[in-house]
Amino acid sequence: MVTTTDTTEIVTQAKMEAVNQPSLKRWLKHFLYMPATKRYFSKQDQAAIAQAVSEAECGHIGEIQVVIEGHLPVNHAYFQNTRMRAHQLFAELGVWDTEYNSGVLLYINLCERKVEIVIDRGIQQATEQAVWDEICQNIIAQLAQKQFRLAVVTGVMNIGEVLNRFYTHSIQEHNNELGNDPVIL
């Protein structure tokens, strides 16, 4: 039986070898990292993030998925960096599979203190890389100040503002295709 994970692994395996250099240092860092996502993001924080996603998705057809991961899975950390992991999760979670190709994945890796935003092809042509880079840098700066909840909520609201500018027309009825709750790995 082929699952989404198996299919994604097969598709991304060749890309991983071509783009990324294996790193024993990265593997060791993730192997020794103590799980911290529950410590940094309580149930109240997760509820606040879900509420922010709900508010940021109002008035447009864009869909936002937040993934917070403490560290890369040890069996992937040797070959995979955070950017590749974000692309893998974008596929596995079905963020690409929205009706209007309007999915956005906000991926945060606490071990490497990196933030990745993966946008679907429906949005990519109308936005600029600098906008997304600025959102990532703002999140990283707030995470460095240990304002974890504020960093994610502000980042989600900033993504919502970008989507509001891109989707100028207002919509009457919109199905929420992706869950609003953050995925904690």
Image (spheres, rainbow, N blue to C red):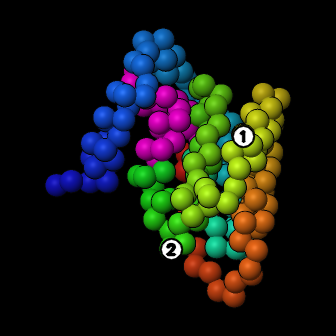
Mark 1, other Cα within 10 Å: few <14 / some 14–19 / many ≥20: some
Label 1 SS: helix
Mark 2, other Cα within 10 Å: few <14 / some 14–19 / many ≥20: few
Label 2 SS: loop
Q: Give the farthest residue toward the left.
A: 1
Q: Which range is magenta? A: 68-89
| Residue at x-position 70% and y-position 83% | 171
Expressed as whole percent of the image width and height from the top left, the position of residue 39 reads 65, 35
| Residue at x-position 16% and y-position 55% | 1
The residue nearer to you, when weighing 162 against 130, is: 130
Number of labelled discs?
2
The residue nearer to you, when weighing 126 against 101, is: 126
9 w.r.t. 182: above or below: above
Residue type at tag 2: Glu
Q: Give the farthest residue toward the top.
A: 25
Residue type at tag 1: Asp
| Mark 1, residue position | 133
